[in-house]
Amino acid sequence: MNLAEIFKIIDKIAKKQATPVYTVGGFVRDLLLGIEQKKDIDFVVVGSGLEFAREFDKKMKEEGSLVEFPDFDTARYIIMDNDEELVLEFAGARSESYRDTSRKPTVTPATLSDDLSRRDFTINAMATEVNNFVFTKDKINFKDKKKLIDLFAGQIDLREKTLRTPLSPDQTFIDDPLRMMRAIRFAGQLNFSIDSTALNSIHENADRLKIISGERIQEELLKMLAIEQPSVCLTLMFQTGLLDYVLPEVSKLDGVEEIYGHQHKNNLIHTFKVVDNIASKSDKILLRLAGLLHDIGKPRTKEFVPKIGWTFHQHEHYGKKLVFDVTNRLHFSKADAKYLGELVRWHQQPISLMDKGITDSAVRRLVVNLKDNLEDLLILGSSDITTGNPDKLKKRLKNYDKLRERIDEVLEKDKLREFQSPVRGEEIMKECGLKAGPVVGKIKKAIEEAILDGKIPNEYEAAREYFMEIKDKYIK
């Protein structure tokens, strides 16, 4: 079912129920910007949003699925089309605000103008009735732009590329503190500036972000990292003080110390460059987040060593521990936390290999430890090179090309993609008369270590022969 048919159904229900329904927010904004946004469309119902959505669900005859939020008089209708998700949100016209310590808003019914006034920015506070659109085969447009409801001069702010709040910034941001992050995200996403009064208000009210749930903060953070140049948002997050509440571990990277003329680089600036480098090579948002977190162990491991200078020994290990603090606080899944922790833990390894010389044994261990995340680690590692010296940059990137070649050679030769001991636990138990336990694991580990060190090839017969040679040592 296409958008034209969907809008026609909504209009018919609105007329039948004598209930005005308006399209609001990003869909309207993006059409004015010449962008056709077909994934998320918000509707304001001057009446019950939930009841309207239920009627819409009946008319759609299971074309999608309805998700209800009764406490907020809101429902989402989700339609899957060729792996693309279209989310239609129906909400009753309302006002909402947060108490000082509450993470849930208080919602009360309101007029359309009240509803638009509570929106985050003027560019998102425009509305038009659902029948004010023309749908052609490859384009959507307004029938009549004069019918746009624009109570807060959103069209002027669109032309001037400025983010302003409909009401006073303090009221807007105190009502929903997440809007401060949204301001920064839109600034980076749309290449807009933030009105100076609003920017100052973000700085003054940054601590209000403490009442917002980890899930909502995570969602906004990932949207920032998804833009073409994430450092735009990250820099604003730091300058306004919001980063201190979202990722204090990253904020602590700022600053440069000098002892006896020895300085270290500003690791915050370096980190933002790393994230931009990753963004130029990969659309994977979690990989960009790994870049943002990769050096968070440095402040606690920083040490000045005479005749050597500044060192950050083992920062990748401490960084991994901090990653789990971050992912727990922002409610990431266990799988995402493991992925981020693994990349932070191993991000120094490719550089270390190059310093020592790229041996087959070292490559084997890298492949086995990283498995499916190896390519992401190499992207992170090459993005970690932020030197301004073009000769150094060229040389270091060339080293990564050599490492990739060696990995391909070793993979082809050793069949390491699904690495494990060719001699399995059942065979070890049967041959040695053992029950399942730590001894069996130690024998398997010894065989795997021999393969990784290049003592024996990754083949069953060679592994079996080696097993027979060493088994008595472990049994005794």
Image (spheres, rainbow, N blue to C red):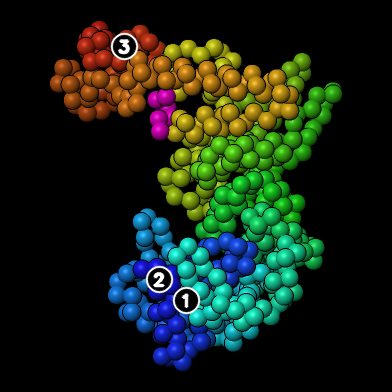
Residue found 36% across the figure and 18% down from its top: 412
What residue lies at 57% left-to-right and 54% top-to-bottom?
223
Q: Residues within 10 Å of mark 2 (few under 14, many from 20)?
A: many
Q: Is residue 243 left or right of residue 77?
A: right
- Lower sequence index among marks 3 and 2: 2
Chain-order first, disc 3 or disc 1:
1
Q: Are marks 2 and 1 in contact (CB under 8 Å)?
A: yes
Q: Which mark is residue 90?
A: 1
Please give the range of residues in magenta: 367-372
Indicate the secondary structure of the residue bearing disc 2: strand
> Mark 3 — residue?
457
Which residue is at a point 64% across and 46% down the rendered structure image? Answer: 229
Q: Tell me the kind of residue under disc 2.
A: Tyr
Checking the image for residue 77, the label placed there is 2
Say which quadrant the N terminus sits in.
bottom left
The kind of secondary structure element at disc 1 is strand
Query: Is residue 297 visible to the viewer in this orientation of the structure?
Result: no
Residue at the right extreme of this rendering: 261
Which residue type carries mark 1? Phe
- Using the rendered view, name the quadrant where residue 347 is placed: top right
Please state the horizontal and vertical placement of residue 131, each as a whole percent of the image: 50, 81
